[in-house]
DNA sequence: GCAGTTATGGATCGATCGGTAAGGAATTGG
DNA sequence: CCAATTCCTTACCGATCGATCCATAACTGC
């Protein structure tokens, strides 16, 4: 942890590590992992390479920290949706959260996870696996939440929780792609409303 | 064009340009535009750099030719769907075509357009714009097709053709992402069936 | 003030990027 | 056999990649 047991020794850091990480997150969000060069990153962070390596380790660790910040911030809708009382509300909060997150004013459009994970050379393989696991976890959590809804009688015994979870994830992913392609928030809200109009879909 | 007006003069080409382009398409499909290095490409094509430049121009032109091949092959479902007699069948052919194209045995999963266009540095900007225009054209064609369906009485006067087109595109994009993330064909067919269960969605 | 510690700035590392120059190899027409 | 044309092989170009070295600056404890 970053807890200091006594007064700091040595030259104090000349930049705000939190703001630097925020700006690094935005660069990764826009250009992906391999598409974001260290020059892009350090310029946006307002520091030079050496300071970045001293503070964050290397490019991969910087991404992991930026990803954690993203998951706890713009992508927090995933965890927040799970505590909704009904499966329908879970789906609604998740999808509308995906729309809002993908169209945040002042942020890159779309989803950091998708932008950083779809493609790349050999360098980004570890990152792609990290993000793939993360998306799979989100899908698993949705599946378990819908299983609970079946047990609670909220959903019919005939519904397939795993299919429902994949259905929701598919639309959320599509929303992210559409947002990255320029679709605005209002249009995507209409799309999500249309998808939620029949619930459950099976 | 490649039409020869008389007998070829000089050393004959030592490779099959069509097969080389096919293999280049697969590499772009898997790694995207910037993620596919010339080393990756030429190794898969079975030729060296010089031969590639002589035959295809440069990396960007190679991608454009690979993209044309992709649009006419695995992504032909887009154009094929438009000639279906009803809007419902258009949507069904489009979405099931997206599923099949994204889960073709022996090919990379997902969609070449998305993999190559979501992210990247400055180099791939022209390619991203090309693909963005292409996806926008697909959406426009779907919109016009649904407008025709409204005129023909196939769809209600109250339906919004543009919204329907974006709805279909969103699900197709989500399918591509899911496929790239490992979802198999059977699962995605179920997702598409679920989405098509209520039609039109608004 | 001095030793110890940490951060910064600038130069630079080897590897790889897309792209190319030069010369030999293979073919056709004379 | 020879000239002309085209393709292929090898080596290389400048630029950029992520990462690091080293000298200097700024701070604390003694």
Image (spheres, coloured by chain):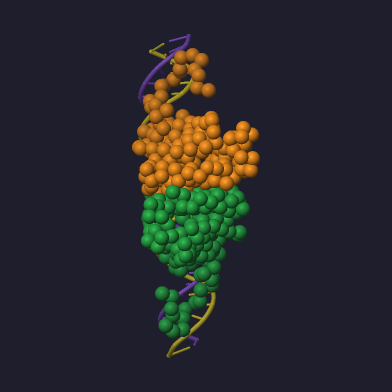
Chain colours: A orange, B green, C yellow, D purple
Front residue of B8 and C3: B8
Q: Please determine whether, in this image, residue A40 is positioned above or below residue C16.
A: above
Question: Is residue B94 in view?
Answer: no
Question: Is residue B77 something one can see in this rendering?
Answer: yes
Residue A100: percent from left, percent from top: 41, 38
Residue C23's spot in the image, x, y percent?
47, 70
Residue at 49% in and 17% down: A4
Residue A24, quarter of picture: top left
Residue at 41% over, 55% down: B156
Q: Exactly how many numbered labels are in the figure?
A: 0
Q: Is residue B195 above or below residue B80?
A: above
Q: Which sits in the foreground, A24 or D24?
A: A24
Q: Which residue shows up at 53% across the image and 51% down it? A: B197
Residue plotted at (51% across, 15% down):
A5
Most foreground residue, D17 or B195: B195
Which quarter of the picture shows residue A186?
top left
Give the position of the N terminus of chain B as an image quadrant.
Answer: bottom left
Q: Position of residue A85 (x, y in %)?
A: 54, 30
Decide which of A105, B33 is in the foreground and name it: A105
Residue B88 % position (x, y):
48, 58
């Amino acid at each position: 942890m970053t807890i200091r047991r006594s007064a700091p020794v040595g030259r104090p850091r000349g930049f705000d590590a939190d703001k630097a990480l925020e700006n690094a997150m935005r660069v990764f969000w826009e250009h992906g992992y391999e598409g974001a060069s260290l020059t892009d990153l350090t310029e946006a962070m307002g520091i030079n390479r050496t300071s970045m390596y001293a503070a964050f380790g290397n490019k991969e660790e910087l991404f992991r920290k930026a990803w954690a910040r993203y998951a706890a911030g713009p992508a927090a809708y995933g965890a927040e949706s799970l505590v909704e009382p009904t499966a329908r509300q879970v789906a609604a909060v998740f999808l509308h959260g995906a729309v809002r997150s993908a169209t945040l004013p002042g942020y890159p459009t779309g989803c950091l996870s998708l932008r950083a994970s779809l493609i790349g050379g050999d360098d980004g393989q570890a990152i792609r696996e990290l993000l793939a696991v993360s998306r799979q976890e989100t899908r698993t959590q949705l599946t378990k939440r819908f299983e609970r809804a079946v047990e609670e009688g909220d959903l019919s015994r005939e519904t397939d929780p795993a299919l429902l979870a994949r259905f929701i994830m598919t639309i959320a992913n599509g929303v992210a792609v559409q947002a990255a392609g320029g679709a605005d928030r209002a249009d995507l809200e209409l799309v999500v409303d249309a998808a939620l109009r029949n619930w459950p879909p099976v």
